[in-house]
Image (cartoon, rainbow, N blue to C red):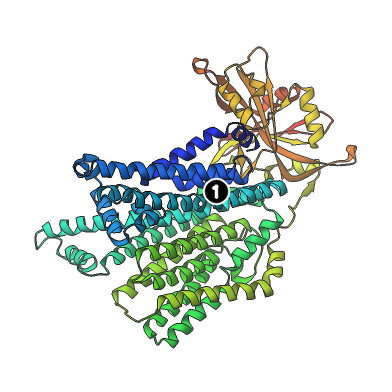
């Protein structure tokens, strides 16, 4: 990352050119909606915060690009207004153009300003202003003013993020990684929500219309019952038909996901392997400042905060005499807790870390994920009923982001596996979709005053959070603090009589798939291990960096200088990596990867103990197609008998041990005394 930032600092004009082109293209007629300007501008802000771009120059270039793009669209509409609608490219997007015309008619000159921040009409409003011959002085005045507001609104959040990343990296690289992950989660969750509403709803409407057309074409006696159900649920004359169809799809999809995850957990499918890998990976990124942040986020999905919110909403509904809605609220929130307890007790899956007792010691499904989805999700459903589309989208995005962050906090703190959180989300979504379908079908028309309801929910959330932080935060922070890894010391006899089997026998990818076997176990200190390998002709693998990565694109680079591709076992990267090259075979290199285990081997002759490592040897064949770049293909050594000779020049003939029809051999290299044992 530092190397990349340095390269940008040396050649900033290329980044500034990209910023101009993106800001320009976003405002071009019709095609601007396809340009990811928000992401690019946020990234530009992050580069400013990192100190590699000038803030005023970047803001000016972005604004200039936006002015130029809107200006070109305006002039195209003004010059070709008579032929514009006859262009085939425009005719295929007539719906978007009609929406833009309605927007301009509604807001007049202010539409130029509003369109800067409203994606569905951003790329059509300027051309419509030209078609309607809006006066140039009026258009360009609003155009320049809106661009000056648009540029900092999109770039300054990135500046804050970039500065925070720089500060976090100065404190800890792991802190920077977590902040980047959280920013990515927030962006992805909000993007999926907005895309689902903007794109998904038209697709649902189109599917509904096609299904209705199919039903109407069927003979009266054929599929009569199916036709009845189709018209019963999807009749477009009923105002609730669209929301019922969306809720039905959510119910089916989330139920299918929950049952699939539960099956994987029960049968120990690869998802369970992915659970362990992601758990170990996140535990390796933990830092004290992020622990405090994650405990604060996880409290928002805990019983203390959720019950304050739930009881506040119930009180408002009772005061307003919304008896039916209050009944739905009680059934939805209370029965969700019963479902969670029932599944926890039935499946009895232990948590990654021992944090609770009783039925709460079980992990599947996540109670925080389920409860936050049910309470916040059903509350959002009640608030957004009969609200404008923009308000619905905003509330939905905020709700989804909050639920996702709560689920991520459970993974980070080691309270749940990934499958627990996925199951909790899907179970909660299925339950609120079912209750929302019943609520909508019953046509409950009680006046909830959604704005007051939303304000009360926000106040209750704030009060519940403050109360929980004051009374429980310190105790929860202590309980979530990860205990030191339990390191077990064993003797050589214990190791030979079976303890060697406790180490991983195969590498487990982050996806949960089992990969190559681990035929090597080595007991030595890091310094001694490196010294012995250096004496045998090995050298530490080159560290990864931007210049080192570019060596793969340089065809004349020696094999020993190329960085080694990282490999992960249960989310942990190999701690040590070494390479060895035979001068007689310059396009082939040996790679040794070692992971540190939680075991120590007693070594009385060295007055202490030595850590036990495990790993594998790989042979990488390099190719240089057309002498332009370097490619590598890797195989690992399955025959353990060759390992001592490749490592230290020692010859052994290991006795094979057959397990489940497979020949399994493990070589144990002992400290200092050059002994090699085989199992």
Q: Residue at x 30, y 57 (%)?
A: 104
Q: Position of residue 504 (x, y in %)?
A: 64, 42
Q: Quadrant of residue 202?
A: bottom left
Q: The C terminus lies in which quarter of the figure? A: top right
Expressed as whole percent of the image width and height from the top left, the position of residue 81 reads 22, 44
Identify the residue at horizontal 43%, vertical 59% (top origin): 259
**Is residue 30 in view?**
no
Furthest toward the top, the residue is 584
Q: Residue at x 39, y 70 (%)?
A: 384
Is 638 or 210 nearer to us in this picture? 210
Q: As drawn, is 243 to the left or to the right of 178?
A: left
Determine which residue is flagged by label 1. 274
Q: Quadrant of the N terminus?
A: top right
User: How many other residues sit within 10 Å of disc 1, few (<14), some (14-19) or many (≥20)?
Assistant: many
Work out whether 612 lies above or below 532.
below
Residue 47 in sight: yes
């Amino acid at each position: 990352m530092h190397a990349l930032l340095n390269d940008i600092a040396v050649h900033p004009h290329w980044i500034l050119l990209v910023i101009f082109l993106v800001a320009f293209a976003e405002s071009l007629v019709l095609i601007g909606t396809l340009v990811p300007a928000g992401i690019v501008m946020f990234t530009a802000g992050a580069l400013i915060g990192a100190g590699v771009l000038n803030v005023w120059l970047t803001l000016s270039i972005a604004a200039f690009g936006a002015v130029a793009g809107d200006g070109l669209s305006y002039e195209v509409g003004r010059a070709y207004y008579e032929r514009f609608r006859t262009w085939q490219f425009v005719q295929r997007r007539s719906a978007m153009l009609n929406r833009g015309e309605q927007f301009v008619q509604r807001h007049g000159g202010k539409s130029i300003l509003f369109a800067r921040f409203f994606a569905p009409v951003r790329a059509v409003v300027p051309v419509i202003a030209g078609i309607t011959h809006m006066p140039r002085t009026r258009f360009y005045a609003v155009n320049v003013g809106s661009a000056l507001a648009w540029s900092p609104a999109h770039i300054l959040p990135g500046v804050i993020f970039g500065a925070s990343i720089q500060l976090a990296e100065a404190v800890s690289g792991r802190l920077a990684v977590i902040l980047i992950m959280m920013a990515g989660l927030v962006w992805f969750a909000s993007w999926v929500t907005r895309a689902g509403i903007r794109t998904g709803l038209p697709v649902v409407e189109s599917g509904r219309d096609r299904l209705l057309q199919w039903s109407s074409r069927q003979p009266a006696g054929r599929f009569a019952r199916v036709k009845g159900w189709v018209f019963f649920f999807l009749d477009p004359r009923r105002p609730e038909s669209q929301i019922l169809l969306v809720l039905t799809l959510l119910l089916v999809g989330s139920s299918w996901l929950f049952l699939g995850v539960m099956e994987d957990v029960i049968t120990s499918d690869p998802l369970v392997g992915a659970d362990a890998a992601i758990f170990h990976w996140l535990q390796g990124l933990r830092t004290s400042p992020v622990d405090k942040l994650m405990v604060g986020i996880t409290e928002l999905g805990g019983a203390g905060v959720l019950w304050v919110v739930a009881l506040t909403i119930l009180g408002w509904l009772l005061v307003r005499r919304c008896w039916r809605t209050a009944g739905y609220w009680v059934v939805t929130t209370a029965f969700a807790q019963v479902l969670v307890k029932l599944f926890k007790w039935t499946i009895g899956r232990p948590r990654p870390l021992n944090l609770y007792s009783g039925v709460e010691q079980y992990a599947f499904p996540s109670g925080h994920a389920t409860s936050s989805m049910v309470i916040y999700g059903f509350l959002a459903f009640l608030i957004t009923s009969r609200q404008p589309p923009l308000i619905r989208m905003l509330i939905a995005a905020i709700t989804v982001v909050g639920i996702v962050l709560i689920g991520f906090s459970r993974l980070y703190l080691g309270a749940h596996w990934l499958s627990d959180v996925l199951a909790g989300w899907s179970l909660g979504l299925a339950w609120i979709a079912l209750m929302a379908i019943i609520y909508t079908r019953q046509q409950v028309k009680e006046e909830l005053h959604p704005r007051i309801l939303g304000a009360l929910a926000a106040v209750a959330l704030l009060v519940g959070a403050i109360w929980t932080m004051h009374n429980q935060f310190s105790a929860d922070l202590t309980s979530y603090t990860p205990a030191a890894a339990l390191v077990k010391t064993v003797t050589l006899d214990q190791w030979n009589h079976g303890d060697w089997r406790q180490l991983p026998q195969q590498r487990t990818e982050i996806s949960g798939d089992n990969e190559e076997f681990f035929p090597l176990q080595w007991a030595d200190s890091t310094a001694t291990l490196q010294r012995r390998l250096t004496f045998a002709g090995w050298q530490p693998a080159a560290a990864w960096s931007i210049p080192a990565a570019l060596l793969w694109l340089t065809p004349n680079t020696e094999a020993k200088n190329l960085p080694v591709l990282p490999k992960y076992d249960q989310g942990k990267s190999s701690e040590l990596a070494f390479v060895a090259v035979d001068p007689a075979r310059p396009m082939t290199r040996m790679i040794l990867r070692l992971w540190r285990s939680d075991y120590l081997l007693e070594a009385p002759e060295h007055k202490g103990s030595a850590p036990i490592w495990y790993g594998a040897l790989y042979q990488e064949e390099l190719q240089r197609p057309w002498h332009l770049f370097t490619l590598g293909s890797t195989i690992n050594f399955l025959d353990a008998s060759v390992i001592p000779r490749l490592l230290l020049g020692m010859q052994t003939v290991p006795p094979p041990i057959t397990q489940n029809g497979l020949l399994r051999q493990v070589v144990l290299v002992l400290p200092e005394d050059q002994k090699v044992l085989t199992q």
